[in-house]
Amino acid sequence: MIRNLPLLGLTPAAGAGCPRKDTCGLPSAGLDESTRAKVAAHPCYNQDAHQYYARLHLAVAPSCNVQCNYCNRKFDCVNESRPGVTSRVLSPEEALAKVAYVAAKVPQLSVVGIAGPGDPLANANRTFKTFELIKREFPDLRLCLSTNGLRLPENVARIIELGIDHVTITMNYVDPEVGVGIYAWVAYAGEQLTGVVATRLLLDQQLAGLRALVAAGVLVKINSVMIPGINDAHLPEVARMVKAEGAFVHNVLPLISEPEHGTYFGLTGQRGPTAKELKALHDACEVTDGPGAMQIMRHCRQCRADAVGMLGADEGESFSPELYLNEEMANEPSRRQAARTQIEQRRAETAALRDERGIVTEGVAGKPPRVVLVAVASSGGGRVNQHFGRAEEFWVYEAGPGWARFVHARNVRRFCSGLLGCDDDPSALGKLVSMLSDCAAVIAADIGPRPREALEKVGVRCITVGDDADGPDSVVEIAVEAAGAALVAAEAARTALVPAELVSVGGVR
Ligand code: CLF
Ligand code: SF4
């Protein structure tokens, strides 16, 4: 197994009774029964689920039919992947062997996705053959597809027939003029198109595909790559349009354009957004007016086309072809079902605790006037359960009274490599502290004396819950809300003593 399943045994406080057992504080609250069932265990469509469930990507689709300016064909499709990595292309049969192996080792596996390394629908036969094999052998696993959308309309019937409930379309513009700065060419019906002709065709295909999928009840996620100066100001318009068309969730990803990746944008010096710019755009894209809801996905990790495991903890390299092609694994759906039952019991308990405390974790309603950023070290399972020095990413939350909303994950270089100490690498510590310096607090299982001193020096409070903590205070959102409420209250008390215009608000925003 990749990672320990969350432990059971957390008991809500005596007398606690969730008055909203049907929704139980989960982010899927407010959805109809069928939609809730579809997203409950999908780590991308449901932020809460990403703390518990794993996904597997199968790299079966090598070619592509468009040229994005942020893509170098030597690497995976950047619409759904971190650039600069390459995946081994699998045949459908090899892909099935990989599913069998991973499903046996990772009982919390809930979703199998095809997202590259090219465009899955530019390789429709390989993609659908793979899905067919999985559907037959592993009907309990949800199927997920990510595409640029060019060949979507002609493939919708196949998607529905195979029961693919989740489809991602990358839509970087709804004005074809904006698209001209993003796509070099689009290949369709034997022709290579450029300029507005190309981007208009791509948009028409994407919208036709989106409408057909929504009409059939498929949950559509829209990915948009944020490219400062090219489409950043335009993406709120994209959000409004795709919400109006019935998209389920909008995922705005930051452009990554390192020169060494050899992409057009990398070579022409096009920069990606800062974390602050990305957060501001996420907030701007959170369309709250009009009927229906559309969530903004804030927890995307831009995974590889061959990613395995929990988001943010890709274990793909542990699953080499030598293992999954040579070892036959028994298919044990009952084991996966037992894992799911255990996870759902745990989630229900933590959700009841959040509800009891009135903590809101998503949307915009209920956001207090003042919040702080709080970083958390967690390896999943809904708990603060990671040592500061061993964390490879921090989850950053907006926190305040009654409020604990995930903002984004920040990747860091783990600075403690030893088993005993946390102070191994001073340069890594400096970078880490600087990366967290805009947070008002860091919460971890434990924090060594040197990082604690360095964090406190830049005004970041250190909060620890201890190893093996299993009480309510170690539940991520409960710890985050408690820290946020205390820091906001302390700031309010401080500012009440002097005229507001003379006060520096520090980490409170
Ligand atoms: Fe994979 Fe994508 Fe399905 Fe998720 S990933 S095909 S929807 S199962 Fe998820 Fe990874 Fe972000 Fe994609 S974190 S890159 S959004
Ligand atoms: Fe590259 Fe994906 Fe764009 Fe194709 S759709 S050019 S593989 S990023």
Image (tube, rainbow, N blue to C red):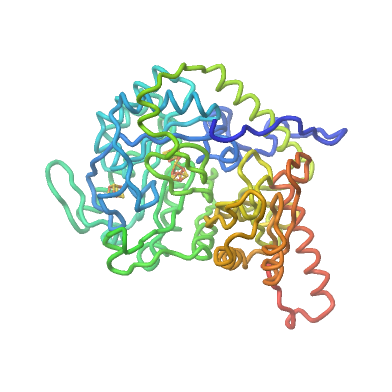
Q: Quadrant of the N terminus?
A: top right
Q: Is residue 271 left or right of residue 268?
A: right
Query: In the figure, 195 relative to 40: above or below?
Result: below
Q: Nearer the viewer, residue 25 or 458?
A: 458
Question: Residue at image x 76%, y 33%?
Answer: 10
The part of the image, by quadrant, that contains residue 151 is top left
Question: Residue at image x 65%, y 64%?
Answer: 439
Residue 150 position in % (x across, y down): 27, 43
Q: Is residue 148 left or right of residue 333?
A: left
Q: Is residue 303 left or right of residue 189?
A: right
Q: Nearer the viewer, residue 84 or 495?
A: 84
The number of numbered discs placed on residues in the rendered structure image is: 0
The part of the image, by quadrant, that contains residue 226 is bottom left
Residue 140 position in % (x across, y down): 49, 21
Query: In the figure, 382 relative to 494: above or below?
Result: above
Q: Nearer the viewer, residue 178 or 52?
A: 52
Residue 344 position in % (x across, y down): 65, 29
Query: In the figure, 494 relative to 347: above or below?
Result: below
Q: Nearer the viewer, residue 357 or 203?
A: 357
Residue positioned most to the right: 15
Q: Quadrant of the C terminus?
A: bottom right
Question: Residue at image x 69%, y 39%?
Answer: 25
Residue 373 position in % (x across, y down): 65, 61
Question: Residue at image x 37%, y 41%?
Answer: 305
